[in-house]
Amino acid sequence: MNSSLRVKATLALVSVLFLLTTGCAPRTFVRSAPGWKVIEFREGLVNNYDEAWQKTVDTIARNWDIEVLDKDSGYLRTTWLYGISGGHHVKYRGRITVKFPEIKMPEKTEVKTSAEWWRSGNAYAPYWVKGFDSSFQRDVFTELAGRLGRTVPAE
């Protein structure tokens, strides 16, 4: 193999390795502030905070670790779950936040999913890019709405 061809092959290999190690965010990542989605409670949970809270906690705890849990204020937040939506397990993460706007006579709850992608393209200043993941959001919302809501929206 001549030296020119060897240099080109080496550069191509280095480029591929660079792309594999830095990676990109999954296609489902949206670089935008996550919004709150509302789940209106089904019959039996309306005005029944204790049962609605317990079903919410049970549903979330089935698949995620809970970091903050405050029944008195109606607030729950999970820890970061790495590798959501098939993203690289150390460079892509998501978490869930649930808030009951009313705890005395609740009719709904609000859910927000956040996602962050580790942008390591600049070796001197890597950072987390904030946003949400459309697939993760859909899956979380569908699961919670199926346990708590009147109907599961088709989004």
Image (tube, rainbow, N blue to C red):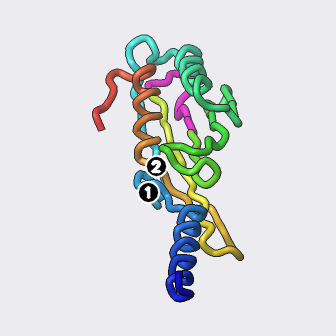
x then y, percent, for residue 10: 57, 77
The quadrant holding residue 143 is top left
Q: Which residues are magenta?
A: 97-107
Q: Residue at x 67, y 32 (%)?
A: 66
Residue 120 in the figure: left or right of residue 26: right
Identify the residue position indicated by label 1 in the image: 30
**Left or right for 151, reference 138:** left
Disc 2 residue type (three-letter): Asp
- The furthest residue to the bottom: 4
Residue type highlighted by circle 1: Val
Q: Earlier in the sequence, mark 1 or mark 2?
A: 1
Identify the residue at image location x=43%, y=35%: 139
Tell me the SS state at disc 1.
Answer: strand
Residue 10 within the magenta-colored segment of the rendering: no
Q: Nearer the viewer, residue 95 or 3?
A: 3
On screen, residue 65 above or below 116: above
- What's the residue at 66%, 69% (across, down)? 126
Return the mark for residue 129: none
Question: In the image as oriented, which residue stretches furthest toward the top?
Answer: 44
Q: Give the labeled residue for mark 2.
A: 133
Q: Secondary structure at mark 2?
A: strand
**Dominant secondary structure (helix, strand or loop) of the stretch shown in magenta:** loop
Q: Residue at x 34, y 21 (%)?
A: 150
Residue 100 position, x and y percent, is 54, 32
Q: Residue furthest front?
A: 1
Residue 102: within the magenta? yes
Decide if residue 113 is on the left or right side of residue 122.
left
Q: Position of residue 89 (x, y in %)?
A: 61, 47
Q: Give above or below for 42 relative to 26.
A: above
Callout 2: 10 Å neighbours few (<14), some, many (20+)? many
The C terminus: image quadrant: top left
Distance in Å between CA atoms under marks 1 and 2 = 6 Å
